[in-house]
Image (spheres, rainbow, N blue to C red):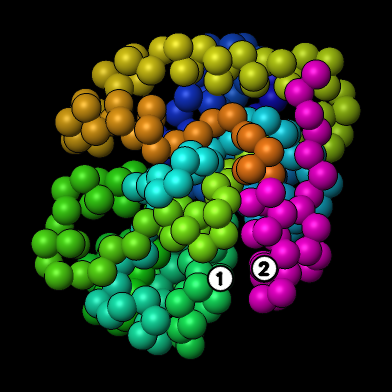
Amino acid sequence: MLRIAAIEFLNAAPLMWGLEADARFALNYTLPSACADSLRDSTADLGVIPVIELARVPDLVGLDGLGVAARPEAGAEVRSILLVSRRPAAEVRTLALDRASRTSAALVQILLRHRFGAAFESRPGDADWRRGLADADAVLLIGDPALRLRVGGEAAAAGLHVYDLAREWQAWTGLPFVFALWGIRAEVFAAHRAWLPQRLHLALEQGLQQREALVALWAPRLQLDPAEVRRYLADNVAYRLTPAHRQGLRRFFALAAADGLVETPEPPMLESLP
């Protein structure tokens, strides 16, 4: 039985469709940062992990073609990766980072530094974004809490600045952003490559076909209108990578390396689906 470290947010739900019922897998739902840690300490065999962790966790194979990414259309929002700030981005001096995040934590620092020209210090954030703003100019918020905040409009109504990081990245680079990919321990991939990539591809195909079932499951869980969950899955998140996504991945790793966030500017090698 292969152990999957599964992101507990809505954004990864289509990638996991049917895997719980497959006797070949055991799923453990947790935060994106913890998914990467599970692969690092070998308590998981594969997982959808923050893409930057493919360069930090040794002996991983990244699976190309499937992931959690922003849509490639100009101006597209992801709505679940936000910078919430008491000041305009260029004036941010202290940044609280969401502890669930690794890739978005790197992305927000790159954007603040290079897109907006901010000079800032970063620190671990609080689980509550309001408490985080009591001690910092801005907070990074990801996943379901960010989506609920964006839909509810509470931060904007309070006069705070709300930046959708996928939209800011695309406006700056012209490229869509990739947040997470399947990471598989190299020995596990070698032992199961004859069937595992195809099985993960099938899970996504079925998850996208069963979008209404996901809406029915997740809308009450998140206490959101079903139309908002439907819109998020259909219009905000891309699950199949395009050449533009791969260009965005290369640009991100080059910038992350220049800022000392990863050791090499080269993105990890990805195994293509057969």
Query: What kind of element bears circle 1?
Result: helix
Residue at 50% over, 73% down = 115
Residue at point 41%, 12% (across, down): 210
Placement of 217 over or under 159, stated as above or below: above
Residue 132: where, in percent of width, then height?
A: 30, 72
Q: Does dot 2 land on a helix, a strand or a loop?
A: helix
Three-letter amino acid code at disc 2?
A: Leu
Q: What residue sits right under mark 1 in the picture?
A: 110
Q: Is residue 262 visible?
A: no
Is residue 273 inside the magenta stretch? yes
Count of numbered tags? 2
Q: Is residue 173 magenta?
A: no
| 243 sits to left or right of 140 | right
Q: Which residue is mark 2?
A: 255
Task: Give the residue at x 64% y 43%.
Answer: 244
Which kind of residue does numbered mark 1 sit on? Ile
Of mark 2 and mark 1, the one earlier in the sequence is 1
- Left or right of 29, for residue 222: left
Of residue 23 and residue 81, the one placed in the foreground of this image is 81
Stretch of the chain drawn in magenta: 247-274
The residue lying toward the viewer, choosing from 86 and 250, is 250
Asked whether the beta carbons under mark 2 and mark 1 sit within 8 Å of each other, the answer is: yes
